[in-house]
Amino acid sequence: MTSLDTRLFGFLACLWGGLLIYFYHSTRIRDYLDIGFHHFIMIGGIGMLILGAYSLINPKSKSNKTEKSKSCCHDHGDHDGDQHPHDHNDCHDHGDHCHHDHEEGHGPFITIFLTLTPLILAMTYTQDKLSNGGMAKKGLYEKPALTSANLPPFTRQDLEKNVPKNEHGEFQLRMISAYYAAGDLEIQDIFEGLPVELEGRIAPEKINNASGDRLRIFRSIITCCAADLQIVGVSLEFPEEANRPQVEDWVKASGTLTFETVEDDVLPLLKIREVIPAEEPYSEFRRRQ
Amino acid sequence: MTQERQDQLADGSYEFLAIFLEGLPFIFLGTLVSGFLGTYLPRGAFAKILPKNNTLAVLISGLLGAVFPVCECAVVPVIRRLVKNGLPVSCALAYMLAAPIFNPVTAISTYKAFNNSPEIAISRLAMGYMIAVFIALIVARKTHSFFLKSSVKTENGDEHHHPRNLNAALNNSLRDLMDVGLYFCIGVVLTAILKTTVIDPTDDFWKELANNSIVGSIGMMFLAFVLSLCSTSDAFIAANFHNFKYGPKLAFMVFGPMMDAKLIFLYSTVFKWKFILFLFVAIFILTGALSILFETKILPGWMSQQTEIPLAP
């Protein structure tokens, strides 16, 4: 690499590092990655800034100088484990330059262009969240997977022991528990008719909503990044007199949990008693347990 | 632009940034390690460490993910430098393909995703290991010129008078970061485009594939290729394809960490494109065949020993 190449690559490393630091510092990272990955972003960003700054300040490594002044001459076409076809210690001269390119790769201009263009476009157009259509692809309107063997037994006593209640005596159930209960007859029996409170974001309802009296409450489940996002939701049925939240609102929805069969699929349904606004958490992703 | 197109553009940008931000620190870590290994590791050091018997060396290399767990993004730059430093390509390939699957993090996440079922986790690890080692043993019989890019071929002999100092190590790291980062970025762009415009895993098309194990396995491998998920998280996604049987789910979890839309571009920093095509076909056939074998021969035996919880009507 020439000094200019190294400086340009160093500049690009600084930009990438700066991007990571920006996402971390602005807390926008919470909309993209699980909270457990946030410190990797900061460490990676600082590391790339240091590497980039070092290359900007000190672009001419000793290895560059040495390689320019030395020539090499051997063939690399061997098999795994085979001996090299000829002796390098007695290196024969082929001229002033190497036969092969030690550092093939692309030049800095094409690397800068091909990496910064999608980054700038993505930064311009991202909404830091998925559209309703995007969320639908992540399972917002999907029925829960049916459970298989090896689940430990779950009883009403387990529910009373492990799930806290609000001031109205309603179980503050996790969304994922209400959702997956629809795939397990044993848990359905325990949850049927249960007074519960669910916390999450509101989306429009597209299932069994001909009368328009329904919305959907959902949470996003994540392991690493938004690419592995899975959205679990529960249908909310409102009585006529109940106040209705707006789509995108973050709420606590209280009522009676039940299950309905729609086109042969069993789905969870919360018959609303009341919906109150809730404070949005730092990250709306819930980590998979 | 229609609202649908605007949503696709926004969703694609979101997906791109999510994968890019998640992967970049690990790529950086990988290139930092590769830069220092390339500078300080003596040429031919592996000849002293690995068994002389090539088959045994490959078998051991395939297990190294259990000791040195790395994700599929970080492993590529490391492998690139190690091959330059004399690690036999067959061993490098066995480690590169097996490590994202045959490691404790992936094992635990698979175990948890499938309701604490050890059978699925063990099957996944075993299948990943077998495929990686089998391909590596085939590769051991080929000349380097068949698959390696000229810039990656082993530097033997007089050590090229490369200095061993911090300056050279950082220079190597920067060069690796730029090479791998570029292809990673291109791969993530392709992934984001495919995910937002072509693939909808909730579409009826995918659900109907579930009726047949062979077609289901092929479909799930294609889906894994496009979704480009991290091997530590893909089990949770696979587990939620409730229409599919275990065979196609295994195909999804084994094929994806070895070959996906972003990985083919990362692989292209080490291998020639014709070899990547060979790798794709080989992994595709082996994964498909083993997952169908698992579905039809192995799984029924396991299931008969377990008590099924009745499913919802």
Image (cartoon, helix red, strand yellow):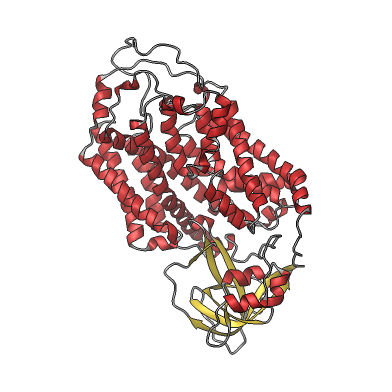
Residue at the spot x=39%, y=49% of the render?
B25
Find residue A147 and report its horizontal and vertical position in percent: 69, 62
For the N terminus of chain A, which image quadrant?
top left
Residue located 60% across and 31% down the image: B135
Front residue (pair B1, B119): B119
Q: Is residue B80 above or below residue B99?
A: above
The residue lying at 51 percent from left, 37 percent from top is: B96
Can I make out residue B278 in this image? Answer: no
Can residue A19 be seen in this snapshot? yes
Q: Which quarter of the picture shows residue A115? A: top left
Q: Is residue A271 left or right of residue B10?
A: right
The quadrant of the image that shows the C terminus of chain A is: bottom right
The answer to whether residue B142 is above or below residue A18 is above
Furthest-left residue in view? A57
Q: Residue at x 36, y 24 (%)?
A: A101
Rendering coords of residue A237 (x, y %) = 63, 80
Specify the quadrant of the image occupied by residue A73: top left
Is B87 displayed left or right of A2 in the figure? right
> x, y (%) of residue A156?
66, 77
